[in-house]
Image (tube, helix red, strand yellow):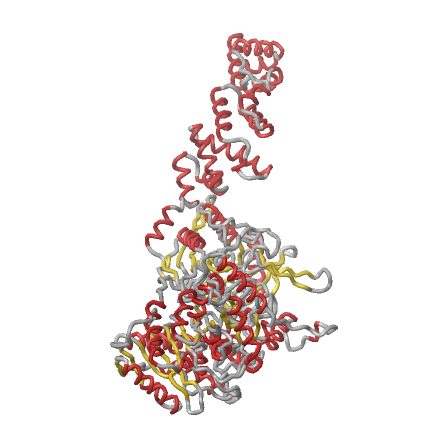
Amino acid sequence: MTDTQTPAAKPFTTIIGLEVHVQLQTQTKLFCGCSTTFGSPPNTQVCPTCLGLPGSLPVMNRQAFALALRAALALDCTIAPFTKWDRKNYFYPDLPKGYQISQYDLPFSSAGVLEVVDPKEAVSRRVGIVRVHLEEDAGKSMHDESAGTADSRIDLNRAGTPLCEIVTEPDLRSPQEARAWLNELKLLLVYLGVSDCNMQEGSLRVDANVNLHIPRADGSLAKTPIVEIKNMNSFRSVERALIYEVVRQWEDWQATGAELGSAPKQTRGWDDPAGITRAQRAKEESSDYRYFPEPDLVPVTVSAEQIAAIRAAMGDPPAVLRQALADTWKISAYDSDVLVNQGRDLVAYFEELATLTGDGKVASNWMQQDVLRTLNERGGTVAEFPVRPAAVAEIIGRITRGDFDTSRGREIFATVLETGTSVADAVTGLGITAVGDDELEALCRELLAANPKIVADVQGGKEQAAAGLIGQAKKKNPNVNPGKVRATCLELIRQIG
Amino acid sequence: MQPLQLSALDLVGAVKRGDLSAVACVEAYLDRIVAVDGRINAFLAVGREPALAQAAKIDVRRKAGKPLGALAGLPVAVKDALCTTDLPTTCASKMLAGYQPPYDADVVARLRRADAVIVGKTNMDEFAMGGSNENSAFGPVHNPWDLNRAPGGSSGGSAACVAADMAPVAIGSDTGGSIRQPAGLCGITGFKPTYGRISRRGLVAFASSLDQIGPMAHSAADCALLMETIAGHDPGDATSLTDPVPAYGQLLGEPLAGLRIGRVAEHFGAGLDPEVARGIESAFDTFRAAGATIHDVELPHARYGIPTYYLIAPCEASSNLARYDGAHYGHRHRAEPGREADQVGQFESPLVEMYCRSRAEGFGPEVKRRVMLGTYALSAGYYEAFYAKALRVRRLIQRDYFEAFAKVDLIAGPVSPTPAFKLGEKTGDPLAMYLVDMYTVGTNLAGIGGISFPCGFTPGGLPIGFQLQGPALAEPLLLRAAHGFQSLTDWHTRRPALSA
């Protein structure tokens, strides 16, 4: 396929694979009992083990392993019955042991898939997962060059935090698709309580591998060198960086004809403000991490019962939930997608509202036009949203009964939101009372008398002219129901005529 | 009462009964250290004040009628590879000179809970790498039986301090023979239990899959006493065994009659000193006379023990020692003041220069040799040929033992091919030095237990060590066999003629 954002008439296929690191939402680190809370003062969540002090030993956090299993099961991975730990050796100041405990040749899971569906185009793509493995995070280096000393400071609070590495097959075919897939992955992991996937806090990190397959005239395929892009701190950055890189590789290939294998794999860093990727140190050969089995830990065996228990407690993934919402509440796939993409709490809010009103479509409309819009404007989470489903259901119910119209309903919604009062109090506070039939008829007669032209127009067959009366009626009494005003006026004109 | 002449069992008994105050007991050993360690160099740190303070507390508790721990008032010397909160832990390396751990090793904590008194930290080969204690950054240890000779290693300080009565018992660690070989060369009893029987938490790692802590004492009975305190499951060590700890001391009395002892022909081949061979044969005679039977067994892969060991141990060590990079603790290279960053020259960055220089300055030659060997053997393209193959041979060696123990209860032989050798004799020839471990590395590779104890002396007056190896978790049997031997002989009661 051709990328829409790359120059037109460039017949090539974009090949993208992603490598995602996700911090698991555990209370404690992977190999010690230290807290994983983000944002604490530097080096306050450390112990001999995560500091790598002499003589310290790791002990596996079983909860972290269970959470990693949940993530892998959600990605349809095969779980290995036997898995082990390996040491990945390299020197860096934020790696206090001089090695990272990771998984090399026997990861705990492999061969999964996560489908990404574009509901607007109804196209779905199956993106293969090569493997998911568990490892410990490193600390953070903070380079302080302000004082001209070029001193670096090291915070090891993060060192030892459990990290899942998720590696996809090169199955993604456009930057947009890569972004959509990342959104789906994040949604899935947040739904399952595996990770908060907060990119700002570093709990989700993405590297992308990309190259182009370019058919030649003779039918053979030219493949551009694979580039690994790093340093992208949002899904938008991932998309932008990939778009940039696709163009860069296309132009580079046209200029040089360089193909895969002609040079070592290049790593390029995304410069977000500049909107470009920059070459980083070329990897002379694949880095030699001297992996070997971690002798301080015992291998882990996983039983079928354990897998079954985790599966049972897992809850529905977003893909299942989308279908379920659409089927149960008779809403469109599009609406279901919008709701599910907002997260589990919003879906729970919707389900409560739909149950109370008995009308999924109306509930969905209110969710999207009122609850979601307000949430987007105000910020905050749906769990702490001040207007609860019962209040919204009450407003909807009274609109249905004809107590007031939708626009007044919105005013009530806004009042409840701002003041935190009950719906009943908001109705009273706004002076909303039901308008009696006699009162309405008297109001309509008054309007007809004052508007002979409209009456004439209606009598001449232009019924839509009656709309002019509704505005005037609302001015005189904001509680009138526009539909009833219209109907009453038309009836009275007929009687006159 | 003369504490220096009592066994650990008797010392604890005397303190508990009130026949001997803990202070008097500890003081006697501290005074002995002052008197003789100038000639031995067994201690890197002596904690006189904290030791006496702790002893005083034990005496107060005893007088108040409060219960005392199983090792009440017993002075213990601890190899400087185990972390202690009140004494520095250096591993006899410049890299960790003055390093003060913030936590006690599990074994140290267990000793303290049992009211043992840690008197000091003992000298060793740097990071436990060596078989002569000459690789210490703080000078070699001298063998109390001949001050011109090496005590063996790496737990040379622990062996020498017990031999010279500077402590009744000591803690050592054994990665390829580092408890048994120095025990043999110093004429004491050294016990390396089954891998995982004693927690490694707080033992500065050399080769994690081989390292094992153990007791060193004059007798097997004293080793058994210590084992009851220091063995046992530690949830903080994933490789620590969960099996219950037997009452080792109560199992010592069983007779030797009926014991089937295996004899490996290869242990008596080239390289074995004839005087050592004679001592070993006489020990076999003692066992025979006591009703044990001797059987020939084969360990067909034993001859691959040294090459296998010298791949696996350096590989693990190269990774275990990566943390000593100057960034977080320990020795860091001090850049010359005023030198510009662009004069870094051969280094790709100031950081890399700091790493390289810190490690070049902090580590001694043998540590560097093994780090390089291990780094090389784990490198891409070499891993399969070296490390992976060594792991396969290790399994063959394990299987040899397993098959041998189907036929015999224990395997016996020399602990070391020669008696104590002269200081400096082997330092120029690393390969000759590596061969001093030829009879001991198999135990570690197989993860089983072994004990060494004196079985005679050379005409020149040097101790000859005898080694027993047993199947996994056969600690009671090993201790019982050694104790049985010591009930029939008095080699373990002899002391070097060190004038105070």
Say above or below: B90 vs A378. below
Nearest the eye: A347 or A274? A347
* Residue most extreme to the right: B338
Res A13 visible: no
Residue A63, x across and y down, in percent? 44, 53
Res B60 visible: yes
Nearest the eye: A172 or B96? B96
Residue A120, x across and y down, in percent? 47, 43
Left or right, A276 with respect to B286, comes to right
| Number of numbered discs | 0
Nearest the eye: B477 or A279? B477
Residue A231, x across and y down, in percent? 58, 58
Residue A142, x across and y down, in percent? 64, 59
Residue drawn at 54 percent across, 70 percent down? B27
Say above or below: B93 vs A77. below
Say above or below: B153 vs A297. below
Tell me the quarter of the picture where residue B324 sits.
Answer: bottom right
